[in-house]
Amino acid sequence: MDAQADGPGLGPRREPVITVGVVTAPSLSAELTPDLVDDIRRELTDRLPDVTWQIELVDDGLVEPPADDSEIVGAARAALLTRGWDLTVVLTDLPLRVARRPVVAHASPVHGVAVLSVPALGTVAVRRRVRDALLRLIDALLGETEDAVADHREAAARSRRMTHRLRELASDVDQQSRSVRFTTRVLTGHLRLLAGMIRANRPWQLAAGLSRALTAAGAAGVFALVTSDVWRLADALGWWQLTAVTAGSVGAIGATLIVGAGLWERVGRSRMRQQVLLFNIATTATVVTGVLVLYAALFVLALLAALLLIAPTLLVNALGHPVAFSDYVAIAWLTSSLATVGGALGAGLETDEAVRRAAYTYRTSGATERAAE
């Protein structure tokens, strides 16, 4: 699984090894024969020859039906960590849904897990469709679209990007390093991979999936905006104090989401430290980015509302001095921080499933769905 390279004078450089675990439900084991697995491995080698591909085939239902998508992804992620795989594709006999819409397949690059509903492929040429779907899903796990690329230069650039991500995924960081050094090496050596994982999560959509947090944030913001004590407090605080309040509010809702929904992974086996650390960094960055987007939206709304609803005469009477635009900015700044704290309280009421759906975006396999149709 880990990449190994011989130093100068120690022999030729060995290609990194990528291990893909393919988990099939027992009822579907006939759909994925050893010959088909060999065909998939050859195709991957032809397309991305700079890495060595290993495919491990496992019969396991993973979850007891009925089960939703997050349960399947969670069970597959646990299998990936236990067995030391780099990527996992699950062939299930259960229906799949993304945003309440039935889909044929989806992939979660952050988890390194893709799921394919084989019954949704139909009854004609199932083996070929399974093969094509698996190849497209592996592309999706590497942050690329599954559609064919017509332009030769674009195809070559796509191949280089995927090869670079694969090398990062398979790279070996000294497992004996101290925690800080280990984290630093993973961060500096996997910047592109982490950026792709975070982008695939679409963190700017996080707040939209948390209805209770949004409701609590809105209620807290309205209450703070019409309270004269908040106006006076915002006037008394300096910019560094307002910044500290902002950091505390963002940290509060971020910690509530990550800890409350169990989004933080623990290291079960020492050789999987790198996988777990990448996952935790991507998860934290996704949540923090999503919360910052929410905070920015609350600030803009609070500033507009303050300018429209708070008459200057009222503000002068409350503050005891002439007011300027900066006073409205300070009120909106503190209001958005208090609204974010209210959002943290609302986030504590969200179900774990709702938080996971909001934090982890599943990429649907559009080309796979068109093939099924």
Image: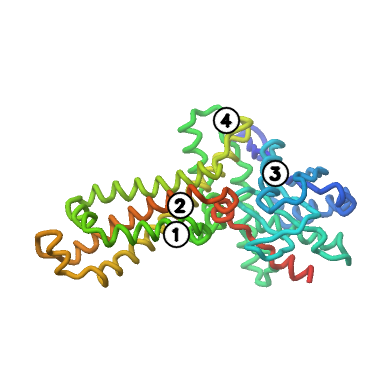
What is the CA distance from the residue labelled 2 to the residue labelled 4? 39 Å
Rendered residue at 49%/56% (across/down): 212
The numbered dot on residue 71 is none
Question: Of discs 2 and 4, which sits in the foreground?
Answer: 2
Residue under circle 1? 215
Residue lying at the far left in this picture: please name it. Answer: 321
* Helix, strand or loop under label 3: helix
Q: Earlier in the sequence, mark 2 or mark 4?
A: 4
Residue under circle 3? 75
Q: Earlier in the sequence, mark 4 or mark 1?
A: 4
Q: Say what amino acid the circle numbered 4 marks.
A: Gln
Tell whether 225 sits left or right of 274. Answer: left
CB atoms of marks 1 and 2 within 8 Å: yes
Question: What crowding class fits label 4: few (fewer than 14 Cα within 10 Å), some (14-19), or many (20 or more)?
Answer: few
Q: Earlier in the sequence, mark 4 or mark 3?
A: 3
Question: What crowding class fits label 2: few (fewer than 14 Cα within 10 Å), some (14-19), or many (20 or more)?
Answer: many
Question: What crowding class fits label 1: few (fewer than 14 Cα within 10 Å), some (14-19), or many (20 or more)?
Answer: some
Q: Earlier in the sequence, mark 3 or mark 1?
A: 3
CB atoms of marks 4 and 1 within 8 Å: no
Q: Is residue 102 above or below residue 31?
A: below
Residue under circle 4? 175
